[in-house]
Image (cartoon, grey):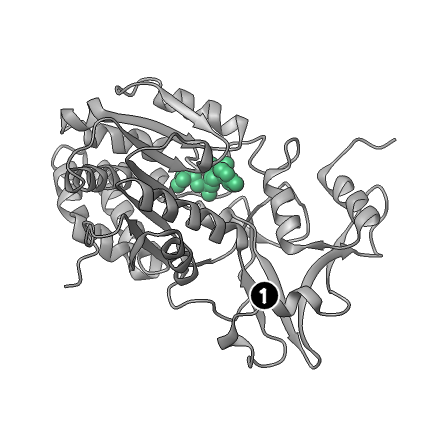
Amino acid sequence: MAAETLARHLARRILMDGPLSVAAFMAEALGHPRFGYYMRRDPFGVSGDFTTAPEISQMFGELVGLWCVDSWARLGGPAPFHLVELGPGRGTLMQDALRAASVVPAFRQAVQVHLVETSPTLRERQRQTLSQTPGGAVQWHDRLEDVPEGPTLLIANEFFDALPVRQVQKTGHGWFERLVDLDPAGTEEEPRFRFVLEAFGSSGARLVPDRLREAPEGSVVEVSPASQAVARTIGARLAAHPGAAVAIDYGHAVGPAVGDTLQALRRHAYAPVLESPGEADLTAHVDFATIAAAAREGGAEAFGPVEQGEWLVRLGIRQRAQILEKSASPAQAADIRGALARLIEPAQMGTLFKVLALTSPGLGPPAGFETP
Ligand SMILES: C[S@@+](CC[C@H](N)C(=O)[O-])C[C@H]1O[C@@H](n2cnc3c(N)ncnc32)[C@H](O)[C@@H]1O
């Protein structure tokens, strides 16, 4: 018998249960306990598949750390409090944030770090990264719900874009959910997959937001019930305990939009999304307005989203770059300027990436979210 692969596992699932929703395919491709993309590898950096903001420059995590210190002070400096990161990757952001936050010793003494991470490989990597960082034991959790109750600051960078989306498509006969089925061109040994539409349009039609119902034929709409559930949980936590959260991701600000944004990245290049499940990163644009609405339903207030470049500039990234440049060699100074440009320039990450803040009711806008 041929060795098990994710593709063969998915093929058997489809034979047994019928075509999978795009969300089920994405959840398996990223999170299958044995074959899921994140479960067995460290995908970051030049030798991996993609690079994230904290991996580009220490300045990113440092400013997020100072944002946390400022938010903590606005909460009245609760001690102890939980600093939670969803999907911490290599742990780089948390390492840089804690180092920057050590300018306020009371923050460092009060902080209890919680990492919500499903991948054993990345948990190990985070353990290594944070082993030298002063500031108490780190606790890991599978789900945000498992983090103990109490005052909370929460960070999520490029977390929501990895949560599964469902897709629906408008046809001449109405809205139908897009599903992933076996492609007859594949074999038992080497299964292939293709998109099909559900047969009778029962569940798909329900997913379409009212204002998009009249979209033209062929339109695709994405919804992420998984993201909405996490946002509602954050909202409920912030309603029950003092706190603030910041979610940074790439996506659209104006609410559910028409468009198929599901993409696969492998070795820094786009790949066909259904081609090699478990071997490529799969992401979709984050719908910030819907996440904000879900968090409000949970009881929190929402601010933004603000474009990443604008937010980092408001927090002082240009000044931080100048300080770092002062003690840098010419080559290092060029790297710092290059990293600054990547993080804030509109043609790079500056406008595509956006930042949403969620807070306990009545706190007012956190740093970087004040309307000018
Ligand atoms: C694109 S990476 C971002 C990593 C990091 N925040 C950064 O900016 O470098 C996504 C992270 O979320 C984790 N992840 C994905 N789905 C998850 C889930 N459902 N629950 C918890 N962590 C998840 C991945 O293992 C990974 O650490």
Tell me the residue at 26%/19% (across/down). Answer: 134
The amino acid beneath tag 1 is Leu
Along the line of sight, which residue is nearer the eye, 291 or 98?
Answer: 291
Q: Quadrant of residue 37?
A: top right
Q: Position of residue 49 (x, y in %)?
A: 51, 42
| Beta carbon of the mark 1 residue lies under 8 A of ligand 1 | no
- Seen in the image, is 33 located left or right of residue 369? right
Categorize mark 1 by other alpha carbons within 10 Å: few (<14), some (14-19), many (20+): many
Disc 1 element: helix
Could you tell me residue 259's position as x and y percent? Answer: 53, 68
Quick one: 202 or 139, which is closer to the camera? 202
Residue beneath disc 1: 207
The answer to which quarter of the image holds residue 86 is: top left
In the displayed image of the protein, which residue is found farthest to the right? 1
- The x, y position of residue 113, in whole percent, is 33, 27
In the image, is residue 363 above or below residue 127? below
Residue 44 visible = no
The answer to whether 361 is drawn above or below residue 279 in the figure is below
Q: Is residue 251 left or right of residue 246?
A: right
Q: Image height check: is 260 above or below 156?
A: below
Residue 345 is situated, as x and y percent measured from the top left of the image, at 28, 57
Mark yes or no: residue 299 visible: yes
44 displayed left or right of 363 = right
On screen, 265 above or below 130? below
Relative to residue 20, is residue 106 drawn left or right? Answer: left
Q: Quadrant of the C terminus?
A: bottom left
Q: Residue at x 26, y 27 (%)?
A: 111
How many tags in the picture?
Answer: 1
Q: Residue placed at 39% from the left, 62% from the top?
A: 289
Instruction: Please give the name of the residue rendered at 44% of the width and 35% of the height, measured from the top-left corner.
Output: 89
Nearest the eye: 307 or 339: 307
